Image (spheres, rainbow, N blue to C red):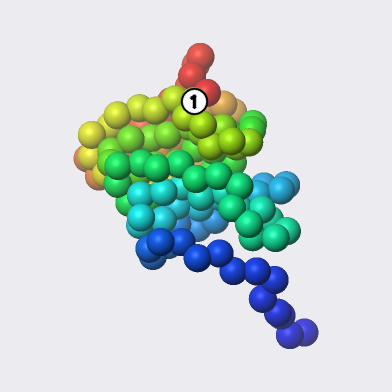
Amino acid sequence: EEKTVLWRFEAADEIFSTPAVGAEQVVFGGRDRKVYSVNKASGDLNWLFTTQGAVDSSPVICDGKVVVGSGDGRLYVLGLADGGEIWHYEIGEPIVSSPAVADGTIYIGADDGYVYAFGGSRP
């Protein structure tokens, strides 16, 4: 069966991030230092969040939040609905890897050679 292009969304720079797909949104990062959320049905922009580095990390959607790393050395937790920053942690070295979330704990590797686990009262 032949597939057709349903929509295209053009970011300002290359996209190395794998999109996370939610019920109504597609969320991905770009080399232009932004995290994008686009409408899953139309491809229209819902919101964008700007970091200080390239976002090659692939985001994870969980519990109404987006978890993503950035080349600026920070792990971000954003609101899925509006892209507002809920929390961030400054690792200090670029984060190119993609987070994993299990049982309320966030796991992420960074360019400093460590894997970090975040849990407890944090999102």
Q: Is residue 39 visible?
A: yes
Where residue 58 appears, as percent x and y from the top left, is 47, 51
Q: Is residue 5 above or below residue 42?
A: below
Where residue 65 appears, as percent x and y from the top left, is 58, 33
Residue at (36, 41) in percent of width and height: 51
Residue at (33, 35) in percent of width and height: 74
Residue at (56, 26) in percent of width and height: 104
Few, some or many residues within 10 Å of mark 1 (<14, 14–19, 20+): few
Where on the picture, by quarter, is residue 62?
Answer: top right
Q: Nearer the viewer, residue 102 or 22?
A: 22
What's the amino acid at mark 1?
Ile
Residue at (73, 58) in percent of width and height: 41
> Which residue position holds label 1?
86
Q: Is residue 10 left or right of residue 81?
A: left
Where residue 5 appears, as percent x and y from the top left, is 67, 76
Q: Quadrant of the N terminus?
A: bottom right
Farthest residue in the top direction? Answer: 121
